[in-house]
Every structure is written in C-alpha cells, then in structure tokens.
Image (tube, helix red, strand yellow):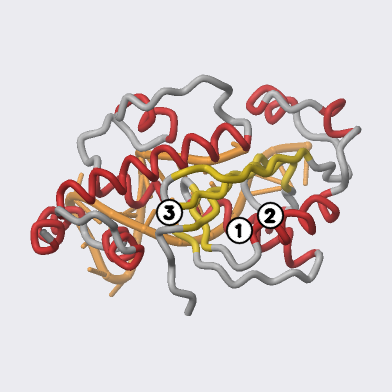
Amino acid sequence: MTQLCADSLIVLDFETTGLSPDMGDRAIEIGAVRLEKGEVVERFQALMNPGRRISAFIENYTGITNQMLSKAAPCDEVMDEFAHFMAGSNLVAHNASFDKRFLDAELRRISRPYTGSFACSLLLARRLYQHAPNHKLGSLISYKNIPAQGDFHRALFDSEMTAKLWMTMLDDIAVQTAQKDVPFTLIQKLSKTPKNAVNKLLSAMS
DNA sequence: TGCCAGGCCCTCTTTAGGGCCTT
C-alpha cells in the first residue's frame, strides 16, 4: 500500500462524455495540478478526442464542443502524457470514485498502471462542513469564501478549485487539532469516520 | 425502441430504498 503524502500530490478532474466508462463513456478533457507543501507547482490540461461526437448536453454542460474536440489529440496520446505527469503521485479528486473509474478505464486502454492512492475531497467535506447547504464543488467554494474566477465544469479550473478546497480543509483540520502538518493517514481516517464521530476524533488529535 | 452508473451515506435499515455527487 502506498503511503499517502501530504507534501506532494496531484489534484485532478475529468470532463467526460457521460457518467459511466462501463457504458462506453470516454474522457474528453483532463485537468490537474501538482501540489507541493500547499502550493501549485505544476499544471496539466488537455482536451482529448474520444473518436465520436459528444451530446448537446455535454457541449452545454462543459462548454467543450465537437469542433474543439475534432482538433484535439486522441485519448490514448493524452493519457500517455498524463501517465508520465502523475507517475508515482497520490491523487485527490472531488467525488474521487467518479474520476478513478475514468482514470482506471483510460489507463487500462493503454496498459499504463499507476501506484498512487486516491483521496476524496467530497467525503472529507461532508464530514468537516456538515452545515454546508450541499457538497457540490461550486457550493463548497462559495461556502468557504474561496476566490474563484473561471468556468466550473472545465477540467483545469475544477482541479484548481478542488486543490484550494483541499488546502482549506487541511488548514481547518490543522486548527482543530493544533497540528502544523496534517498527516494524510489522518485524512484517510477522517474520510471514513461516521459524521457524528468526527468532532470526537479531531478533539482526540488535539 | 427504450433504457442503461456507482460509491457513499442516511434512515421509516441490515432479507431496502433513496438522495447526493460526479459528466
């Protein structure tokens, strides 16, 4: 098992043709940032051509058009490049189970395994911010008053916003536990802790 | 032709059902 490291990780986001790679859906854009000690030190963004037209719903939802994708490199080429970018890193995404399914599916197509572990900002936010109106990415950004200028539902912007939310949550945990550095193992444990036991766990850490 | 997801989590639960979140 890879040891998650709070000092360096990749925050990523996919835009896709739909919800399920098992039903034939493909990635159409990937955005990612590399975080080191709380700072974005590297970015990755690429459209990718899934080899077929996308629906009007996805065009409207993402702002990514069939014309844009017609000029993009094929998925295999982009994902090979991204595999190099993320090699050996641990990963964070908002609703990670969704992005993990697409990452697994796209990397499987090009026979590129990865070794990092996934963490989920949605699961953590549900525990830390139980009074938020909801736990959609955009709502949490507003709830925490995080500055945001750009287009949600584009991969790089969403990954940047997820990274800011992630660091905000780490700061909040650090304050509650009086720890300067929050171990990733604690974040994993928090993400699996029943909501009504979260405060007790944080108090025990302080 | 029409339909198709999946993991997490709560509750009117666990031999289940439904809402939330992602595109």
What chain letter is assigned to the residue under label 1?
Answer: A
* Most foreground residue, A49 or B2: A49
Relative horizontal placement of residue A146, taking residue A205 as reference (left or right): right
Q: Of the residues shown, which amino acid type is indicated by label 3?
A: Cys
Residue identifier under label 1: A101
What chain letter is assigned to the residue under label 2?
Answer: A
Q: Cα distance, mark 2 to mark 3?
A: 19 Å
Relative horizontal placement of residue A145, taking residue B4 as reference (left or right): left
Look at discs 3 and 1 and give the one toward the viewer. 3
Q: Cα distance, mark 1 to mark 2?
A: 7 Å
Residue identifier under label 2: A21
Above or below: residue A35 compared with residue A55: below
Query: What residue lies at 84% left-to-right and 33% top-to-bottom?
Result: A69
Above or below: residue A116 compared with residue A11: below
The image quadrant of residue A159 is top right
* Residue A90 horizontal/vertical position (percent): 52, 62
Residue identifier under label 3: A120
Q: Of the residues shown, which amino acid type is indicated by label 1?
A: Arg
What chain letter is assigned to the residue under label 3?
Answer: A
Label 2 neighbour load within 10 Å: few <14, some 14-19, many 20+ = some
Above or below: residue A42 compared with residue B5: above
